[in-house]
């Protein structure tokens, strides 16, 4: 599947679904989750926590509340905070499950961050590779606009470089 890389605050994006980089508890703390919580309001965090905990690699869906989206897909690429780090397998599973859930919901657009990186401790270039490969390999029924988002200049450069490498090796 084709995708683009964009830079910015995920909470400022407009899409059918925004993907939250969650831990298994679904408690929305810092990083991507914090940005979405600030943009969506405390009701978003309460709705997420009410759906948890979930297994590592699984997802839960909530309303997007005050965000410019229909849904937030909470993808648990890492254990609960302090209980370990994300792995390539957990990132791959969480990404694939987020894409599948968005497809099941009939979403046409989705914005996804580098799951499992940042506070989850997985190296950004490696995590971006796992996410980009999972997006590339996904066969969607409804998704037409998938954006892989990075916040800072440095992370955007890394994600863009990795995404270009993955696209160049497309099957």
Image: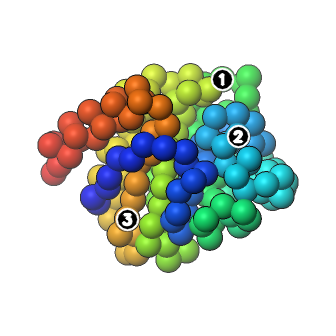
Q: Percent from the top left, x then y, of residue 144?
A: 35, 69
Query: What residue lies at 66% left-to-right and 43% top-to-bottom?
Result: 35
In the picture, measured across the screen, residue 107 lies left or right of residue 47, that is: left
Q: Which residue is mark 1?
A: 84
Q: Percent from the top left, x then y, of residue 134?
A: 37, 48
Q: Secondary structure at mark 1?
A: loop
Q: Secondary structure at mark 2?
A: helix
Compare marks 3 and 2 and give the one earlier in the sequence: 2
Q: Quarter-wise, where is residue 56 in the image? A: top right
Q: Secondary structure at mark 3?
A: strand
Compare marks 3 and 1 and give the one earlier in the sequence: 1
Compare marks 1 and 2 and give the one earlier in the sequence: 2
101 is higher (above) or lower (below) than 116:
below
Report, in whole angstroms, how far the alpha carbon at label 1 lies from the one at label 2: 19 Å
Q: Residues within 10 Å of mark 3 (few under 14, many from 20)?
A: some
**Between 102 and 3, which is closer to the camera in this rendering?**
3
Quarter that holds the N terminus: bottom left
Report, in whole angstroms, how far the alpha carbon at label 3 lies from the one at label 2: 24 Å
Query: What residue lies at 32% left-to-right and 52% top-to-bottom?
Result: 4
């Amino acid at each position: 599947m084709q995708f683009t890389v964009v830079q910015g605050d995920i909470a400022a994006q407009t899409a059918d679904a925004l993907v939250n980089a969650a831990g298994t508890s679904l408690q929305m703390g810092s990083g991507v989750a914090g940005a979405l919580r600030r943009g969506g309001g405390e009701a978003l965090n309460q709705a997420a926590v009410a759906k948890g905990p979930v297994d590592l690699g699984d997802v839960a869906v909530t309303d997007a509340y005050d965000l410019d989206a229909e849904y937030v897909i909470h993808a648990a690429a890492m254990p609960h905070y302090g209980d370990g780090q994300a792995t390539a397998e957990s990132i791959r599973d969480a990404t694939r499950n987020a894409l599948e859930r968005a497809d099941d919901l009939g979403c046409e657009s989705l914005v996804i961050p580098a799951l499992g990186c940042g506070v989850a401790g997985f190296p950004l270039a490696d995590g971006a590779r796992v996410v980009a490969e999972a997006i590339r390999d996904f066969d969607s029924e409804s998704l037409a606009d998938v954006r892989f988002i990075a916040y800072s200049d440095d992370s955007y450069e890394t994600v863009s470089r990795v995404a270009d490498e993955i696209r160049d090796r497309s099957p």
